[in-house]
Image: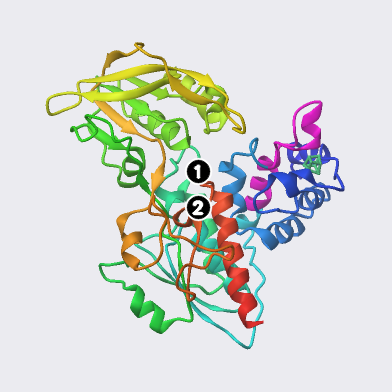
């Protein structure tokens, strides 16, 4: 028995209207029920409840922005601390990984053949929920390992690779086939998959760093945060000043990694205030504790240098809340420009899909995301798109939700 966990579980009020689950959790996990099972020390029962709605509990328990999701509306949070739902989900998720837990599988008569391109959180979730229903699922993965951003987009100090691998193994035990080192346009073609499978699900993410389109962005020494995390191609940062532009978790992760790799100074620039930063508060604090500096309400307007980055020009901003807006907009303060010395700049202001998305002959948005209807279906009724590629809110739980929804949709077509 784990006393600390039991105490945390007992702190839950088992609210009838479950705001944590109904308002907070994108996956609508039955939070009070799985907590109740932990309270009863019935850990398998807790895992059974979790796996009804998620196949990533050991991952979401660790890296979901809990205060912005399930813990935000927790009734306990009104007068004190909310229930630490992330910790309890991690506990039950880890219990399942350590105790050879197997996800229940059904057998259906009208089995479909489904190809999923991309083995990140959305693709893995869709694969699992289809395989649970007895469908025949093959994942086509670009790399020689599954996980997508769970492996290369989140550093080990936030999400140990071993946990991801064990979670993937548990999912694959459902009998999902995986074909590794398969990349669209290189050795994998959508037309072939369309012929061979009943449905194709696109789940290869949107992992190109968005650009600001400012002067100097093409200088040597300007990197995209996503690409730095994905390819791990870091320069030697020793004695260097690195400016990281952005306020989300990619900005925090890259800033901390760069600092840990020996940069003399790492400065995060963000055009709004700390309160509006999309990154989790604990990640911002960790970055600060590790010596990362922050320039809030500062926007990059130009990167200066001959061939390499030499300076960054910034402008100060004021925040103005316009009618109908949920958060204030930053407005540049005239004549407040100034420059700081810098050796490298990391752009971490958001992500857009790779060009391969536009080359599939499907309707796309002006930003390159694949257009889908409310069912996740693209302009080709045989093809679905999920996760970041279809512009779902870019958290793991939202990506997983889109994968689960499409799996349900495809399954409904045959039952
Ligand atoms: Fe428990 Fe908080 Fe959910 Fe109520 S809102 S059931 S206290 S986790």
- For label 2, count other residues whose C-alpha is less than 10 Å away and answer few (under 14), some (14-19) or many (20+): some
- Rendered location of residue 314, percent (x, y): 33, 18
Which residue lies under the disc numbered 1? 159
Quarter of the image where one finds residue 322:
top right
Residue at 55%, 27% in the rendered image: 276
Total numbered circles: 2
Which quarter of the picture shows residue 255?
Answer: top left
Q: Is residue 217 visible?
A: yes
Please indicate whether residue 190 sits to the left or right of residue 70 in the image: left
Q: Is mark 2 within 8 Å of ligand 1?
A: no
Tag 2's secondary structure?
helix
Regarding residue 292, the answer to whether it shows in the image is no
* In magenta segment, residue 77: yes
Q: Which mark is residue 326?
A: none
Vertical position of residue 287 compared to residue 6: above or below = above
Q: Which residue is mark 2?
A: 164
**Quadrant of residue 7 in the image?**
top right
Q: Quick check: 33 above or below 292?
A: below
């Amino acid at each position: 028995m784990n006393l600390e966990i039991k105490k945390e579980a007992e702190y839950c009020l088992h609210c009838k209207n479950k705001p944590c689950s109904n308002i907070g959790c994108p996956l609508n996990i039955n939070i009070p029920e799985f907590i109740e099972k932990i309270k009863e020390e019935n850990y398998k029962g807790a895992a059974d409840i979790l796996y009804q709605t998620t196949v990533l509990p050991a991952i979401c328990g660790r890296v979901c922005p809990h205060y912005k999701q399930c813990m935000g509306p927790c009734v306990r949070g009104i007068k004190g601390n909310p229930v630490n739902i992330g910790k309890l989900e991690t506990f039950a998720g880890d219990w399942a990984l350590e105790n050879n837990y197997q996800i229940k599988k059904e057998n259906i008569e009208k089995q479909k053949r489904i190809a999923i391109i991309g083995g990140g959180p959305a693709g893995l979730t869709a694969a699992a929920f289809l395989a649970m229903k007895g469908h025949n699922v093959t994942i086509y993965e670009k790399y020689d390992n599954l996980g997508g951003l769970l492996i290369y987009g989140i550093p080990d100090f936030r999400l140990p690779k071993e946990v991801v691998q064990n979670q993937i193994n548990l999912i694959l035990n459902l009998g999902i086939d995986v074909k590794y080192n398969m990349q669209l346009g290189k050795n994998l073609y959508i037309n072939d998959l369309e012929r061979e499978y009943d449905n194709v699900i696109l789940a290869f993410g949107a992992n190109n760093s968005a650009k600001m389109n400012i002067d100097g962005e093409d200088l040597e020494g300007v990197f995209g945060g996503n690409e730095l995390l994905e390819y791990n191609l870091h320069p030697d940062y020793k004695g260097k000043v690195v400016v990281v532009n952005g306020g989300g978790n990619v900005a925090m992760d890259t800033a901390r990694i760069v600092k840990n790799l020996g940069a003399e100074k790492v400065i995060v620039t963000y055009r709004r205030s700390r309160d509006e930063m999309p990154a989790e508060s604990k990640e911002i604090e960790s970055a600060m504790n590790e010596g990362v500096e922050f320039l809030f309400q500062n926007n990059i307007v130009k990167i200066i240098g001959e061939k390499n980055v030499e300076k960054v020009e910034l402008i100060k901003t004021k925040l103005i809340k316009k009618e109908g807006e949920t958060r204030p907009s930053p407005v540049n303060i005239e004549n407040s420009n100034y420059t700081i010395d810098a050796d490298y700049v990391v752009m971490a202001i958001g992500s857009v899909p790779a060009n391969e998305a536009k080359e599939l002959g499907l309707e796309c948005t002006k930003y390159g995301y694949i257009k889908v209807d409310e069912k996740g279906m693209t302009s080709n009724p045989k093809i679905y798109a999920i996760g970041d590629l279809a512009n779902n809110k870019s958290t793991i739980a939202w990506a997983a939700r889109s994968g689960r929804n499409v799996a349900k949709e495809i399954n409904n077509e045959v039952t």
